Image (spheres, coloured by chain):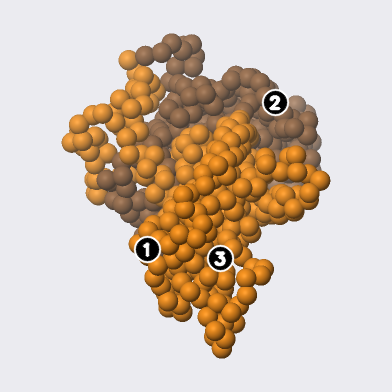
Amino acid sequence: MSRAEPGVRPGAGHGEAGARPAAEAGADAGPRASGPVGTVAGPPRGPGPLWTLGLFRSELLTTFRRWRTLALLGVLAAVPVLVGIAVRIETGDGPAGGGGHGDGPAFISQITNNGLFLVFTALAATLPFFLPMAIGVVAGDAIAGEASAGTLRYLLVAPAGRTRLLLTKYATTTAFCLVATLVVAVSALTTGALLFPLGELTTISGTRIGFGEGLLRALLIALVVAASLIGVAALGLFVSTLTNSGIAAMATTVGLLITVQILDQIPQLQAIQPYFFSHYWLSFADLMRDPVYWDDLLRNLGIQAVYAAVFGSAAWARFTTRDVTA
Amino acid sequence: MEERPAAEAGAVIVTRALTKRYRGGQLAVDGLDLTVPAGSVFGFLGPNGSGKTTTIRMLMGLIEPTSGSARVLGHPVPRGARAVLPRVGALIEGPALYGFLTGRDNLLRYDAADPTADPRTRRTRVADALERVGLAAAAGRKAKAYSLGMKQRLGLAAALLQPRALLVLDEPTNGLDPQGMREIRSLIRELASDGTTVFLSSHLLDEIEQVCTHVAVMARGRLLTQGPVAELAAGTRGRLVVTTPDTADAARVLKEQGAGDIAVADGDRVDAEPPDRDLAEVSAALVRAGVRVRGFAVERASLEDAFVALTGEGFDVAG
C-alpha cells in the first residue's frame, strides 16, 4: 500500500504512546545531532503524562520573565515598605501607639506594638485595588496579549489545544495571585521585623496568641487573600478571550474592578452587593478573631468559586469556538 | 487504514467547497476545491487579499469554515486538528515571537506547547532547528533585537522543531535579502527531497516557478486553476518571435500566414500568436518574401504569462 504519508498511523491514539516504555519512546525521537531535523515524520508520539505540566512550566517562566510582571510585583512589594516607614515616622517621636485609633487600613494602629500587624495592614491596604489591578493586568493579557502578538496562532498550531491552553493560562493567573499576595506579605513581614518589635499579639477578640501562631495566621490570611482574587482572575481571563488587544482587555478588567468597588459603596445597591466579587474581601480579618468567625470567610470563598465557574465556563465557551484571526 | 476516494488517495490536503464568509459579510474564500498531492512542493499563488491566508488558517484549525470541508493528512479539520497538527510545521502570516525571550527560549516555548514533543530531546532539537536556519550564532539574543529576516528564520525554525509530514509556509521569504531567499529555497528543496510535502503560499511568481512542482492560483477568494507547474505554463500558448531588420514585411507575412495579435517591438523584433499550422511553413513563407530572418523561435510562456492569461489582469491587490 502506497501511503501518502510515510510512517503515519491514523489510528494512533493519544495517550497510547505515552504509556510506552521510556526507552522506546526515546529511541523514536531521540537526539540525532547529525541527522536532519525536518525529515519525514516517524510514528507520532502521544502526549506524555507530564506534558500539561511542561506547558504550565513554560507559561510560568514566560509570565514571570515579562518586565511588566516584575514591575507589578515591585510595586506590590513597595506598598508595605511605604506603609511601614510612614507609620514609623508618624510615631517615631511620640509614645508608642500614640498614632490614634482613627481611620486607616485595619490593624494600622497596632503596627508599632508588633511588626507582624504590618502584614495584615499591608494586605488590607492592597486588597481593594493594588492586588486585583495586578491580577487584572496579568489575566487580561493572558489570551489577548498572545493574540495581539500573534503568538497565539503558533501555540494553537503547535498544537497546545484550546482547552488546555486556557486551563494553563488560568492556572498561571492563579499562581500569580498567590505569588503577588506572598510578595506583599513577605515584604510586609520583613519591613515589620526591621522597623518594629515582634512578639506576642492580641487578637481582635482581645485574647493573646504567641508569635508562632500569629505567623501561622498571617500565612493563612495570605492564602485567603490570594483565594479572594480568583474571581477577578476568572473575570479577566474571560474578558481576555473577547478581544485581540491585550491593552483593551487589561483596561476593561481594571475598569470593571473599579466599577464594582464603587458600586459596593452605594447604600441603595445593598440588595445586589453580596453578589459582588469584592463584597466579602475584607472578611480575612475574621481570621484574627479567637475563635475564628467563619461565616463571611466561607461566603467569600463561595463567591470566588461561583465567579471562577461562571466566567471560566464563559471563557471556555468563547475561546474554543472563536476564530483566531490575529 | 481509512477509506478515501481513489482520486484523493495520496493527497495531503483535500478541500471540498471550502468557504469562509467573515462576520462583515465579506466572502474571503469561495467554494475552494484544492488537492495537494503527497510529496509535492505546492505553490499557492495569488495577489494579496485573494484568500490564501484565510485558507491556510482554516487548514490549521484556527478558524471555522462557513461551509465545505477540509482534510489534512487524512483527518478532518478543524475537528481532528489535534491529531494532525503535531505532524505539520507551519509559518502563518509571518513569524510571531516573544520579544523579551531569546531566540532559543522562543523555540523552547513553542516546543513545550506541542503535546507530542519529547521534553528530553527538546534542547537538542531546538539547537538543530536553529542550526538549520542559520541562526545558531544569534540564538542567545533577545528576539526583539532580531531583524525581520532573522525573525522569519526563527519562525521557520519553529516549523522544523520536529520531523514533519507537511510544512505549510505562508510567504516564507518575506523580508529576506536575496541571499536569505536563496538559502530558504534550497532548504525547501532539501526538505521536499526528504519526502516532506511543502505547501508554499506566495505572491512572488518567480519563487513559485523556482521551487514548486505544483501550483494553484487564487484570485478574489476563488480557485482559478491548479496542477503541475509545467502543465499550467504549457497551457498558455507561447509567442512566436521573429528577429529581423525587415519588421514591416515580416509583420505582413505573418498576418498572411494567419498569426494574430502581431506586435513590433525593439526595432528588430516581431512577435505574434503562433498560427495553427506548421511553423516551418511560416518560416519558409518569410524567406520567400525576402524577409531577412535573424531569429525565429517560440518563446515558452512563463508562469507570469499564465497568471495574466488566467486573471486577465495584472498581479495587483484585490479590491
Q: Which residue was labeled with disc 1? A: A210
Q: Residues at marks 1 and 2, common chain?
A: no
**Amino acid carrying mark 3 in the image:** Phe
- In the picture, measured across the screen, residue A209 lies left or right of residue A85, that is left
Q: Which residue was labeled with disc 2? A: B30
Q: Colour of chain B?
A: brown
Q: Position of residue A251 (x, y in %)?
A: 69, 54
- In the picture, measured across the screen, residue B21 lies left or right of residue A37, that is right
Q: Position of residue B190 (x, y in %)?
A: 38, 43
The chain shown in orange is which? A
Residue A292 appears in view: yes
- Locate the C terminus of chain A by quadrant: top right
Q: Which residue was labeled with disc 3? A: A107
Q: Position of residue B279 (x, y in %)?
A: 63, 28
User: Element type at marker 2?
Assistant: strand
Residue found at x 58% / y 79%: A98
Q: Chain of mark 2?
A: B
Marks 1/2: CA–CA distance: 75 Å
Q: Chain of mark 3?
A: A
Q: Please, is residue A218 above or below residue A270 in the view?
A: below
Residue found at x 53% / y 33%: B60
Hey, which residue is sitting farthest right in the picture? Answer: A268
Crowding at dot 1, Cα within 10 Å, few <14 / some 14-19 / many 20+, comes out as few
User: As rendered, which of A50 and A201 lies closer to the eye?
Assistant: A201
